[in-house]
Amino acid sequence: MVATDSQDQAYYSIFAAGLLLFLIMALLTVLIRTIGGRFGQREKRHERAS
């Protein structure tokens, strides 16, 4: 466990880095699900046409 003063600049830097990482991971998750959903729909359409 890291003990830091909550008023210290390093504390806010760690918080900002964690928040940025969370937002990037959320964006990647949404993009992957969107792309995966589109490919899934294409495969279903292709199977119906056969």
Image (cartoon, helix red, strand yellow):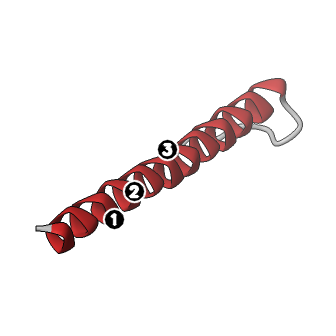
| Image-based side of 38 in relation to 45, left or right | right
How far across and how far down the image is residue 21, in percent?
A: 58, 38
Residues at circles 2 and 1 in contact by the CB criterion of under 8 Å = yes
> Number of labelled discs?
3
- Residue corresponding to mark 3: 28
Q: Which is more toward the observer, 35 or 7?
A: 35
- Label 3 environment density (alpha carbons within 10 Å; few <14, some 14–19, many ≥20): few
Query: If the image is split into quadrants, where does the C terminus sit?
Result: bottom left
Residue drawn at (64%, 45%) of the image: 23
Residue drawn at (24%, 69%) of the image: 44
Position above or below: 14 against 3: above
Q: Secondary structure at mark 1?
A: helix
How far across and how far down the image is residue 39, in percent?
A: 31, 54
- Label 1 environment density (alpha carbons within 10 Å; few <14, some 14–19, many ≥20): few
Residue drawn at (75%, 34%) of the image: 11
The extreme front residue here reads 49
Q: Amino acid at mark 3?
A: Leu
Cα–Cα gap, marks 3 and 1: 20 Å
Residue drawn at (74%, 28%) of the image: 13
Q: Which is more toward the observer, 14 or 42?
A: 42
Position above or below: 16 against 26: above
Q: Secondary structure at mark 2?
A: helix
| Image-based side of 26 in relation to 16, left or right | left
Cα–Cα gap, marks 3 and 2: 15 Å
The extreme left residue here reads 50
- Residue corresponding to mark 2: 38
